Image (cartoon, rainbow, N blue to C red):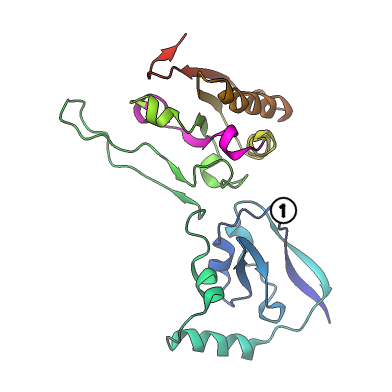
């Protein structure tokens, strides 16, 4: 029969698993880190999963598909409610990939500055790795972005207070990841209301790839966004 059913664009899917959690019928599962519509007869076509996808990978389409099988959905729910052992697919469906599930943090009130004060994390969201981040997420709207090289967190002691505080942090290493971040960063800038970009890199040559990716993304985004580059020396100082 021809009916309305969801479509998942695997190229856009970030593997966060939020759609699988939102699908009350169990039609969506996480397979090899990507969301897949594995039971077309479980999809009712109402699209509870759509607003939960931060990457915009889910849409509606009308095509030939099996009819929605309400009885089979009910039986599946009863099976899980009885506490029967879950197989690997069931476990992935239940929680998605915990390493890339999107989350936003609210930290406790700032502590008074004193030598005895315990430092607090200024990371505002999860994930923070550029490769794992979706191109759209609520925390990007109105955000100031910090694009930082992995090593800066270990080299510059006050990175959290001086750079991460009040920003959405994206980290990566172009040498270890061996990828060009420019397209991912461009999509983030183009699809969200980003207010500013700060790039924090190391003085080593390989970190130039991170700066070039950010510059290319800014240029190709079609937007005018204030930005700056800060370079950290290997002994943990800010270079002019």
- Residue nearest the observer in this picture, 147 or 55: 147
Q: Can you give x and y, in whole percent of width and height, for residue 90 in the image? A: 53, 76
User: Which residue has dot 1 on it?
Assistant: 11
Residue 161 included in the magenta stretch of the image: yes
- The quadrant holding residue 44 is bottom right
Residue at the (34%, 28%) spot, across then down: 161
Give the quarter of the figure containing the N terminus.
bottom right
Q: Can you say whether 177 is above or below 27 in the image? A: above
Q: Can you give x and y, in whole percent of width and height, for residue 232 in the image? A: 45, 19
Q: Is residue 81 left or right of residue 90?
A: left
**Does any portion of residue 165 appear in the rendered image?**
no
- The quadrant holding residue 67 is bottom right
Q: Is residue 188 left or right of residue 21?
A: right
- Residue nearest the observer in this picture, 144 or 99: 99
Q: Residues within 10 Å of mark 1 (few under 14, many from 20)?
A: few
Residue at the (58%, 59%) spot, across then down: 52
- Residue nearest the observer in this picture, 39 or 209: 209
Q: In the image, which residues are magenta?
A: 159-179
Pick out the residue farthest to the left.
116
**Does any portion of residue 117 appear in the rendered image?**
yes
Q: Can you give x and y, in whole percent of width and height, for residue 173 in the image? A: 55, 34
Pick out the residue farthest to the top.
240
* Tag 1 secondary structure: loop
């Amino acid at each position: 029969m021809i009916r309305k059913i969801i479509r998942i664009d695997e190229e856009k899917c970030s593997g966060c698993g939020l759609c699988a959690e939102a699908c009350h019928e169990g039609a969506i599962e996480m397979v090899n880190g990507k969301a897949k519509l594995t039971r077309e007869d479980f999809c009712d076509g109402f699209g509870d999963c759509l607003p939960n996808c931060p990457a915009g990978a889910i849409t509606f389409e009308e095509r030939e598909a099996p009819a929605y099988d309400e009885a089979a959905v009910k039986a599946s729910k009863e099976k899980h409610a009885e506490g029967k052992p879950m197989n690997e697919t069931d476990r992935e469906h239940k929680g998605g990939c915990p390493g890339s599930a999107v989350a936003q943090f609210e930290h406790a009130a700032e502590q008074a500055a004193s030598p005895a004060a315990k430092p607090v994390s200024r990371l505002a969201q999860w994930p923070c790795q550029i490769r794992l981040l979706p191109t759209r997420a609520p925390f990007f709207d109105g955000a100031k972005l910090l694009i930082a090289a992995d090593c800066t967190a270990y080299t510059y002691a006050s990175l959290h207070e001086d750079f991460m505080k009040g920003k959405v942090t994206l980290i990566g290493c172009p040498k270890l990841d061996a990828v060009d971040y420019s397209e991912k960063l461009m999509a983030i800038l183009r699809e969200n209301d980003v207010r500013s970009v700060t790039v924090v890199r190391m003085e080593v040559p390989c970190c130039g790839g991170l700066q070039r990716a950010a510059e290319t993304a800014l240029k190709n985004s079609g937007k005018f966004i204030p930005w700056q580059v800060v370079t950290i020396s290997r002994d943990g100082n800010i270079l002019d």
